[in-house]
């Protein structure tokens, strides 16, 4: 009896794991209850206890990584391939094998031998990072130059949250870029380097540049990244590090305010923790420049607080200052998300890092899906009704978009 396509694929996988030649394995077309799960990426890692395989479970907005010893990895993969994941793509130095299963149980296997000179080498990672698969290597010299890590690639005292935030942001951005169709696949999924014209990325309110450097490190030559920052001293510091660490000229910092920065087209705009209405300035700048992807993490939502009124039923709970503060945050960020929708973006709002690490963890991500001003009137009317409900007559982003509340 001839072995099925799936069995032949599993035999190749078993040989690659047994012989230590697996470069990577990508599983796709997930079928199952968890519809946030998209892919499983598997690659070799070297841990203190010996060779393992890192399983990176890619969900819509986060990755979950688990390491398995070779035998356990094979058992788990055999149960997943053709059942929970219909597509599987195996890479070894000498060949690639692609399995495509159908829901009716049939399957097709394509094996391609790689010509000499095009081989891929297995590259176990993790010897330096206790098995964690970071998108930004913890021993990157720029992290050290910015004071985030020490000589051993570990977060310096007081910088553990910043280190986590940098890693989480890099992970999120790589998801969002793919979702926005910007075709910059993260290293795990890329079989060969993708050549496109550089993406223009703006980091509005870049501060000490932690996340600006992270974006540039993540995208390399594929992006021209510019930080805009009001504080001249921070701009000088960041430009100095960018030159010393060989990031310049693809990464540069400019002194100035977000609202007064002229932009001639931008692909991605990020603004993390730009204070109060600086977030609105950043959103307005991104929208005006036609950014395909906008990612902001707002903070100190003060503008609307004096205007906020609430129905009498909420008056008693709102005598507590903390509820007023949270209400102001909610109303401000909800209005921003709805205004982005009105301006032609599909938005999602989520917590991007655990509240245990920072309270400023709300993120609004917006992907441009249609030209501005093409939504139906009911969206605008709902937005106005929401503003009316809370007594809002004026808001920074609405003013800049000339949207009358
Ligand atoms: C809280 S820091 C955040 C820095 C960085 N984005 C991060 O998350 O690590 C906010 C930065 O935005 C800058 N900033 C605030 N308002 C600004 C504006 N209107 N134009 C330019 N920079 C601004 C501040 O000077 C400060 O460095």
Image (cartoon, rainbow, N blue to C red):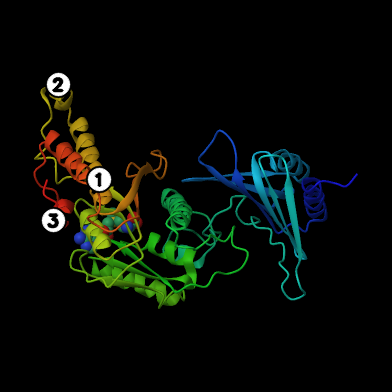
Check the picture and name the quadrant holding the N terminus.
top right
Check the picture and name the quadrant holding the C terminus.
top left
Label 1–label 2 contact, CB within 8 A: no
Q: Is residue 144 visible?
A: no
Q: Which residue does the image show at 69% across and 58% down from the upper left? A: 124
Instruction: Check disc 3: other Cα within 10 Å, few if <14, some if 14-19, many if 20+.
Output: few
Front position in the image: 194 or 211: 194
Q: CA distance from mark 1 to mark 2?
A: 25 Å
User: Residue 91's spot in the image, x, y percent?
Assistant: 71, 59
Query: Element under label 1?
Result: helix
User: Residue 310's spot in the image, x, y percent?
Assistant: 13, 30
Q: CA distance from mark 3 to mark 1?
A: 14 Å
Tell me the number on the disc at residue 313: 2
User: Residue 172's spot in the image, x, y percent?
Assistant: 45, 52
Residue on which disc 3 sits: 402
Query: Is 180 rendered above or below residue 362?
Result: below
Tell me the number on the disc at residue 23: none
Q: Which residue does the image show at 64% across and 39% down from the upper left? A: 84
Sequence order check, earlier mark of 1 and 2: 2
Sequence order check, earlier mark of 3 and 1: 1
User: Residue 97's spot in the image, x, y percent?
Assistant: 74, 57
Q: Which residue does the image show at 14% across and 43% down from the upper left? A: 304
Instruction: Check disc 1: other Cα within 10 Å, few if <14, some if 14-19, many if 20+.
Output: some
Query: Element under label 2?
Result: helix
Residue on which disc 1 sits: 338
Q: Horizontal placement of 99 versus 398: left or right?
A: right
Name the quadrant where ligand 1 sits: bottom left
Front position in the image: 334 or 377: 377
């Amino acid at each position: 009896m001839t072995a099925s396509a799936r069995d032949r694929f599993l035999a190749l996988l078993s040989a690659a794991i047994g012989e230590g030649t697996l470069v990577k394995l990508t599983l796709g077309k997930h079928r199952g209850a968890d519809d946030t799960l998209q892919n499983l990426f598997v690659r070799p890692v070297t841990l203190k206890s010996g060779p393992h395989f890192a399983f990176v479970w890619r969900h819509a907005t986060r990755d979950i990584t688990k390491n398995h010893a070779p035998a356990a990895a094979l058992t788990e993969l055999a149960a997943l391939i053709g059942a929970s994941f219909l597509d599987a793509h195996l890479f070894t130095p000498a060949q690639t094998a692609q399995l495509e299963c159908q829901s009716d149980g049939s399957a097709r296997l394509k094996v391609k031998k790689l010509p000499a000179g095009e081989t891929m080498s297995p590259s176990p990672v993790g010897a330096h990072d206790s098995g964690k698969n970071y998108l930004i290597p913890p021993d990157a010299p720029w992290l050290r130059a910015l004071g985030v890590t020490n000589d051993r690639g570990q977060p310096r005292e007081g910088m553990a949250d910043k280190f986590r935030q940098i890693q989480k942001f890099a992970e999120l951005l790589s998801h969002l870029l793919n979702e926005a169709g910007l075709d910059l696949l993260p290293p795990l999924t890329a079989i060969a380097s993708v050549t496109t014209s550089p993406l223009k990325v703006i980091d509005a309110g870049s501060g000490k540049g932690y996340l600006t450097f992270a974006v540039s490190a993540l995208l390399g030559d594929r992006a021209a990244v510019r930080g805009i920052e009001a504080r001249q001293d921070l701009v000088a510091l960041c430009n100095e590090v960018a030159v010393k660490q060989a990031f310049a000229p693809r990464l540069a910092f400019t002194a100035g305010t977000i609202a007064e920065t002229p932009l001639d087209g931008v692909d991605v705009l990020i603004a993390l923790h730009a204070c109060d209405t600086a977030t609105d300035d950043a959103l307005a700048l991104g929208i005006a420049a036609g950014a395909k992807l906008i990612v902001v993490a707002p903070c100190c939502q003060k503008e609307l607080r004096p205007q906020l009124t609430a129905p009498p039923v909420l008056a008693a709970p709102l005598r507590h200052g903390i509820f007023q503060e949270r209400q102001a945050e909610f109303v401000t960020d909800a209005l921003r998300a709805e205004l982005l929708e009105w301006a032609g973006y599909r938005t999602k709002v989520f917590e991007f890092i655990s509240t245990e690490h920072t309270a400023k963890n709300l993120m609004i991500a917006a992907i441009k899906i249609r030209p501005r001003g093409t939504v139906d009137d009911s969206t605008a009317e709902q937005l106005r009704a929401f503003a009316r409900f809370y007594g809002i007559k004026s808001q920074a982003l609405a003013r800049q978009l000339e949207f009358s509340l």
